[in-house]
Amino acid sequence: MEISKKQVILRGRELTLALLIVFVIVVVSFLKKGVFLNGTNFEAILIGLAYDLMIAIGMTIVLILGGIDLSVGSVLAFVGIITTLLLQDNVPIPLAIFTGLAAAGLIGALNGIMIVKAKIPPFVMTLGSMSFFRGLCFVLTSGYFVNKLPENYVKIGRGALIGISNNVLVAFAILIVIVVLIKRSKYFRQMFYIGASPRAAFLSGIPSGNLMIFGYVLCSLLAGLAGILMTSRLAMGHAGFGGGAELRAIAAAVIGGASMAGGEGSILGTALGVVVIALINNVFIMFNGSSNWQAAISGLALIIAISIDVLRNRLKKQTN
């Protein structure tokens, strides 16, 4: 009964977010006729949210498990740097991409193992990883862009199928796969029990530690994939890529129904949360707001989302 009630609440939130998105699109389209919904702007919105969507999906998995990953933006930049530096040294494209993704997986495994085995709080561990790998990006590049990349690599991010960017197709393919896995895979469903009550999940025989480590590996892999697609499309790597990505991911996940306390979350809700934040940023710029405000908007969205989450958890405790 409790699970059914949670599902009803999540479906209601998803419907509310969907209606909000439609409302914003209709109003802004009317106010900015021929500008907001033109092909160039619409494509820019979709490509921009594709990177955030991949990262936010991974963040949602970690939040469901009762953790948090502040290192995703740094992982995005680091994987991009590793991959582009290898390509500059004429390493074959498949090998460079594999190495970049392997590095992402190792970072996720390191985060997960230290959190599970060494009992380091997720916030502290991933904050340390965020600082270390962001700093390492600047050490490896001295702050310069890594460019002059192979044309075939650039084509990956700039290519399209039936008029839709490869980046968007990859992001939505990942969205569909994770949604199906959460519905069909017992291991993904068990993540909710781990986040809701880690001790009870362990006592019931659920491999809590392994699934927690897997969650962090998956989160880092998705951030790394976003880094590869971003550097491919922009034809360069840079130590500053992915700045603020962790804030947008957490905000989107919590707006979509995830709880900072763990045990709750909706991948579809997260996707809608990503769209909401992307629309807000785009609309703000369209009405002559400075693009420098994007980080502030994401931070404000995060504060509001977490405040609502805290209030919701307090009300839940009072009713129990």
Image (tube, grey):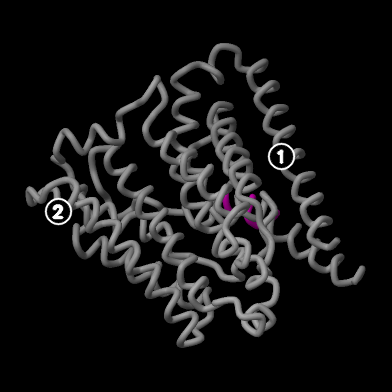
* Mark 1 neighbour density, 10 Å: few (under 14) some (14–19) many (20 or more): many
Q: Is residue 301 magenta?
A: yes
Circle 2: element type:
helix
Residue 300 visible to an observer of this rendering: no
Residue 237 position within the rendered picture, expressed as x and y whole percent measured from the top left: 25, 48
Q: Which residue is mark 2?
A: 86
Q: Which residue is mark 1?
A: 17
| Region in magenta | 298-304
Residue at screen point 40% across, 20% down: 163
Circle 1: element type:
helix
Q: Quadrant of the N terminus?
A: bottom right
Horizontally, residue 42 falls left or right of residue 276, namely left
Q: Is residue 137 magenta?
A: no
Residue 208 position within the rendered picture, expressed as x and y whole percent measured from the top left: 56, 77
Q: CA distance from mark 2 to mark 1?
A: 42 Å
> Between disc 2 and disc 1, whose residue precedes?
1
